[in-house]
């Protein structure tokens, strides 16, 4: 599965109404740590099919970032059944990310 780029408009349909767990990477173009995490997110998206992997640019969808109290980026939020199930802030390794989405 490839990474899905979210907007404020697509967030509800892609994340909250998803039948499978969804990982959302809250990021921005100017964020150095986000750029380091990006390739890891891409790798995981290409390896898993039972979790939807999404990216949300906080500069373009600040309403969603505010709603989920994203104060630092990168922030990863795992949603299950439309509810926030887990949060991770900062860069993590691929193995840590795989463990996080299996939590």
Image (spheres, rainbow, N blue to C red):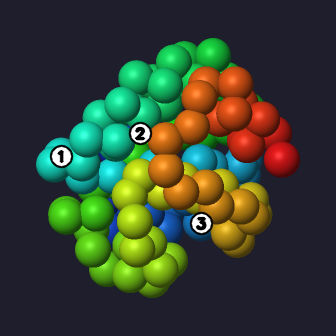
Mark 3 → mark 2, Cα distance in angstroms: 14 Å
Q: Is residue 48 left or right of residue 10?
A: right
Q: Is residue 98 left or right of residue 59?
A: right
Classed neighbour count for the residue bearing mark 1: other residues with Cα under 10 Å, few (<14), some (14–19), many (≥20): few
Residue visible at 16% across and 48% down in the picture = 30
> Looking at the image, do the residues carrying marks 3 and 1 touch, with CB atoms under 8 Å apart?
no
Residue visible at 69% across and 33% down in the picture = 96
Residue identifier under label 2:
4
**Residue 17 appears in view:** no
Mark 1 → mark 2, Cα distance in angstroms: 16 Å
Residue visible at 34% across and 42% down in the picture = 34
Q: Position of residue 62 (x, y in %)?
A: 27, 74
Image disc number at residue 16: 3
> Looking at the image, do the residues carrying marks 3 and 2 touch, with CB atoms under 8 Å apart?
no
Q: Foreground: 71 or 51?
A: 71
Residue visible at 49% across and 31% down in the picture = 41
Residue identifier under label 1:
29
Mark 3 → mark 1, Cα distance in angstroms: 25 Å
Q: Position of residue 63 (x, y in %)?
A: 31, 80
Q: Foreground: 44 or 3?
A: 44
């Amino acid at each position: 599965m490839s990474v899905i780029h979210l907007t404020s408009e697509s967030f509800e349909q892609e994340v909250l109404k998803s039948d499978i767990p969804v990982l959302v990477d809250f990021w921005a173009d100017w964020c150095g740590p986000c750029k380091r995490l990006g390739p890891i997110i891409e790798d995981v998206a290409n390896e898993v099919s039972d979790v939807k992997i999404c990216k949300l640019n906080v500069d373009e969808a600040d309403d969603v970032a505010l709603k989920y109290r994203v104060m630092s980026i990168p922030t990863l939020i795992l949603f299950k059944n439309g509810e926030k199930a887990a949060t991770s802030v900062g860069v993590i390794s691929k193995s840590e990310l795989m463990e996080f989405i299996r939590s």
